[in-house]
Amino acid sequence: MSEPTTPVGAMPEGWTLPAVTPFNREWFTSGEIAIQTCEACGTLQHPPEEICHVCGAMAFTSTVLPGTGTVYSFTVVHHSVAGALDDVVPYTVVLVSLDASPDVRVVGNLVDGDAQDVAIGMPVTATWVERIAQDATKVLLPQWRRVKERP
C-alpha cells in the first residue's frame, strides 16, 4: 500500500466526500484496491453495489488487487463546475483498467504530469489522498500516477 499523500491534481480540501456505506467502506477506508467480491459467484464488481450484477446475491467480501493498471479512457476538465475547483483546473480524470482484472475499471484523477501527455494504454499506479469526513471517518481516495516503466 502506498502512503496517503496529497498530490498535485487531487481533489481540493473541503470538497464533498462520498458517503461511506457498508458496501463501499473497504474501498474508501482501506488504502488498497479492495474490489467488492460476490460470496456466491465470485464476481468482482466496481463500483460496490448492494446486489451482485451477475447472480443477484447480496453477500460480499473484498479482494485486494495490486494498484496497477492502464488508462482505458480519460477526459481533461478545463472548466470548473464549482468554485472549489477553480484553482485546480485543468485536471485529468482517468478510467483505469486494472492489470489483475482488466474488466474491472476504476475512476480517479491523474495526479501528476501534463494533460497533453495522457494516452490510452498508459500504465498507472494507485496512490491515496486522505480526507476526514464530517463523522470523523478517515477516507482514502484512490487516485492515479503515471508509471515511467513497467517492471
Image (spheres, rainbow, N blue to C red):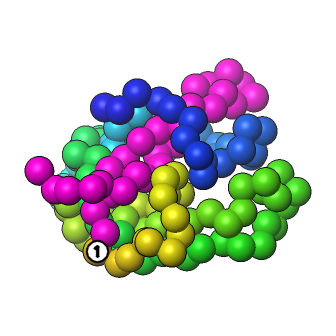
Residue for point 68% across, 21% down: 136
Q: Nearer the viewer, residue 80 or 102?
A: 80
- Graded by Cα atoms within 10 Å as few (under 14), some (14 to 19) or many (20 or more), the crowding at tag 1 reads few
Residue 13 at what x, y percent from top left? 73, 38
Res. 60 visible in picture:
no
Q: Name the amino acid, label 1.
A: Gly
Q: Which residues are magenta?
A: 122-151
- Does the magenta run of residues contain 142? yes
Residue annotated with mark 1: 121
Vertical placement of 7 versus 144: above or below? above
Vertical placement of 117 versus 82: above or below? below
Q: Nearer the viewer, residue 27 or 32?
A: 32
Q: Quadrant of residue 102?
A: bottom left
From the viewer's perspective, is 81 left or right of 114? right
Q: Quadrant of residue 55?
A: bottom left
Residue for point 16% across, 56% down: 150
Residue for point 36% across, 56% down: 146
Residue 144 at what x, y percent from top left? 43, 53
